[in-house]
Image (cartoon, helix red, strand yellow):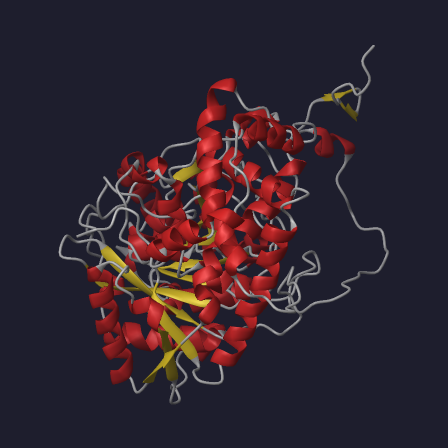
């Protein structure tokens, strides 16, 4: 028989969520989604707000399992590369022409055309 | 069918002047014309005349001056920028984007004589494990067209499984090469972080993204990796360690190896046919002389939240550059799945939640890395199923995103640690669905994984099976 909600940790995650609800962040509301969308600079249609609030909350509830991990004094790992302080010689190399650099954007007289910042 | 042959065999036939690149390219386009309409493996194809023209030029080269992948047709996930084929990352945000430069992986392959045929379907921006989250044609599994091919590099897996190309290049952030490799019965390698340059790869999550081969067998993966691996000054995370002659090294006799199996890989939540096939694979490795040891990775059960919190945080930052000014359409064009991931990432980085979510994840990542370091004292490689579940039917994942996230339970720990892993075909369920296994190794030890994978494939024939819809043309 195939489990619909598959994954070796699904049951554990569910039990965890019940036990740690008191630790979890607050419910994600439509207002929260609007605030997140503003921070992320993404227009979200009004009709998507309810479903996004529900699915984002469901994902965050699962991800909050990380709050139960006993970390002690473990440091952070932001990258797994071995390389540190990677530099190159400060020499001029061939680069893009103005026309090529502009060809995928909206341009005007050889410049990128950007949205107005100040209202007139 | 020429495209059924290994890269080495094709090279041998080229050296004897028994085949031409024009023949291979024609065969690739024939297969694409036959199957791509149904399966949706490609977002963009090169003009056939243009690819044939390149093949004709290559055929004129004397044998001595030919590259290691001379005349061999290949495809790439549509996340690698190429000068002569548009790049979309599976999103209409970038529809019609014409890159002014070439990704390092594309350049290295073409310098080695390989011929680019087209760009493969994918979940937009790598966001998904089904190749359904796309603004282009939804890709279908060639073993059962009602099911997903896996993802996010689903198109490349289909193209290789149905012999539309000799090999493909994928990108693996949390399993995006291994997941579709398992679902489509091909071999796929997630390389050590830094082993292959990512210059010209549209980023999903920068601390996790890797570039690797998707091939018919481990031997082909070694041949392709030999060409694409190595330092690139254009990618600051690219390793300065010398890349090896992987193609030669896979034939080296295997020394006695200890294979570690974490108990979670045999947990009852793993679907029964997958468990059974995995146990058979373990016996095969034992028959090759390997010894099996049970190991534990205590933080493994936290890998999913760690991975998704890090990946979504990084993707909301990476996708901030798509402002519709220098390239691409405006930000209202992100698909619903991408919007959801950006919002979750923004939440995880937001003041008040950052310490409890993002920071805990990157600290948990350190724990997992340390546990893997200890693990290597007890075993040389880790073996497990690639996925805990079989390919879902189309539309099932859209109903509940957690189905998609939990399917990644066995693949994401590898990306968090930066280790390499090789996905291999290992058998079929009673209903004819392919099941894969993965070998996980120490950092920069691709050599052992490829050698062991090659030995396994000399003993088994799962990797030679092709979907029944693929016409068999005898040569």
Quarter holding the N terminus of chain B? Answer: bottom left
* In front of the other: A114 or B472: A114
Q: Position of residue B423 (x, y in %)?
A: 37, 64
Classify residue B137 by image quadrant.
top left
Q: From this viewpoint, which residue is outermost toward the left?
A: B430
Q: What is the quadrant of the C terminus of chain B in the image?
A: bottom left
Q: Is residue B217 left or right of residue B200?
A: left
Q: Position of residue B86 (x, y in %)?
A: 54, 36
Residue A14: x and y, percent?
A: 37, 51
Residue B15 x %, y % = 40, 67
Q: How many badges with numbers are in the image?
A: 0
Extreme bottom residue here? Answer: B256
Q: Is residue B324 visible?
A: yes
Q: Is residue B63 visible?
A: no
A42 shown above or below B6: above
Which residue is outermost to the top?
A: A120
Is B236 situated left or right of B227 in this image?
Answer: right
Q: Say left or right for B417 vs A117.
A: left
Q: In percent of the image, x 63 and y 68: which residue is there?
A: A74
Whether residue B58 sits left or right of residue A118 in the image: it is left
- Depth order, front residue of B329/B21: B329
- In the rendered image, the vertical position of residue A18 relative to residue B83, given as above or below: below
Q: Quadrant of residue A82?
A: bottom right
Residue at 30% x, 51% y is A6
């Amino acid at each position: 028989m195939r489990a619909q909600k598959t994954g070796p940790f699904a049951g554990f995650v569910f039990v965890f969520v019940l036990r740690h609800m008191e630790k979890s962040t607050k419910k994600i509301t439509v207002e929260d989604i609007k605030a997140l969308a503003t921070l992320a600079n993404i227009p979200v249609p009004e009709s998507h707000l309810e479903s996004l609030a529900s699915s984002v909350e469901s994902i965050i509830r699962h991800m909050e399992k990380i709050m139960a991990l006993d970390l002690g004094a473990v440091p952070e790992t932001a990258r797994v590369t071995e390389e540190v302080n990677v530099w190159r010689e400060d020499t001029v190399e061939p680069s893009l022409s103005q026309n090529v650099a502009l060809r995928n954007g909206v341009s005007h007289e050889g410049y990128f055309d950007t949205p107005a910042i100040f209202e007139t | 069918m020429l495209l059924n042959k290994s890269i080495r065999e094709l090279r041998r036939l080229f050296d004897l002047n028994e085949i031409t690149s024009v023949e291979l390219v024609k065969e690739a386009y024939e297969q694409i014309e036959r199957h791509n309409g149904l399966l949706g493996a490609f977002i963009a194809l090169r003009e056939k005349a243009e690819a044939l023209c390149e093949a004709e030029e290559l055929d004129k080269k004397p044998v001595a001056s030919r590259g290691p992948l001379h005349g061999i047709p290949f495809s790439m996930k549509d996340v690698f920028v190429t000068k002569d084929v548009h790049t979309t990352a599976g999103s209409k945000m970038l529809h019609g984007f014409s890159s002014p430069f070439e990704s390092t992986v594309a350049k290295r392959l073409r310098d080695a004589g390989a011929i680019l045929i087209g760009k493969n379907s994918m979940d937009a921006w790598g966001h998904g494990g089904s190749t359904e989250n796309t603004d282009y044609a939804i890709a279908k599994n060639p073993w059962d067209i009602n099911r997903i091919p896996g993802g996010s590099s689903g198109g490349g897996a289909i193209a290789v499984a149905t012999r539309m190309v000799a090999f493909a290049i994928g990108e693996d952030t949390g399993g995006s090469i291994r997941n579709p490799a398992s679902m489509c019965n091909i071999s796929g390698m997630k390389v050590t972080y830094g082993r292959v340059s990512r210059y010209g790869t549209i980023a999903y999550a920068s601390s996790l993204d890797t570039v690797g081969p998707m091939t018919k067998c481990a031997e082909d993966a070694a041949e392709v990796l030999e060409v694409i691996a190595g330092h690139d000054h254009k990618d600051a995370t690219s390793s300065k360690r010398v890349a090896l002659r992987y193609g030669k090294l896979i034939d080296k006799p295997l020394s006695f190896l200890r294979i570690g199996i974490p108990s979670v890989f045999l947990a009852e939540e793993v679907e029964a046919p997958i468990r059974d096939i995995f146990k058979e694979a373990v016996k095969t490795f034992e028959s090759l002389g390997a010894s099996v040891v049970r190991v534990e990775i205590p933080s493994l059960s936290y890998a999913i939240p760690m991975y998704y919190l890090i990946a979504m945080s990084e993707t909301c930052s990476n996708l901030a550059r798509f402002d519709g000014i220098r390239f691409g359409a405006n930000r209202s064009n992100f698909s619903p799945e991408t919007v959801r991931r950006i919002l979750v990432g923004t939440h995880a980085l937001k003041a008040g939640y950052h310490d409890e979510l993002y920071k805990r994840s990157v600290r948990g990542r350190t724990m997992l890395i340390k546990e893997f370091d200890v693990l290597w004292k007890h075993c040389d490689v880790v073996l497990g199923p690639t996925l805990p579940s079989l390919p879902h039917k189309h539309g099932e994942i859209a109903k509940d995103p957690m189905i998609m996230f939990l399917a990644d339970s066995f693949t994401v720990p590898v990306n968090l640690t930066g280790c390499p892993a090789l996905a291999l075909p290992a058998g079929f369920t009673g209903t004819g669905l392919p099941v894969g296994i993965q070998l996980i190794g120490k950092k920069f030890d691709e050599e052992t994984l490829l050698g062991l994978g090659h030995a396994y494939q000399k003993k088994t024939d799962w990797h030679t099976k092709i979907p029944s819809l693929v016409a068999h043309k005898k040569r």
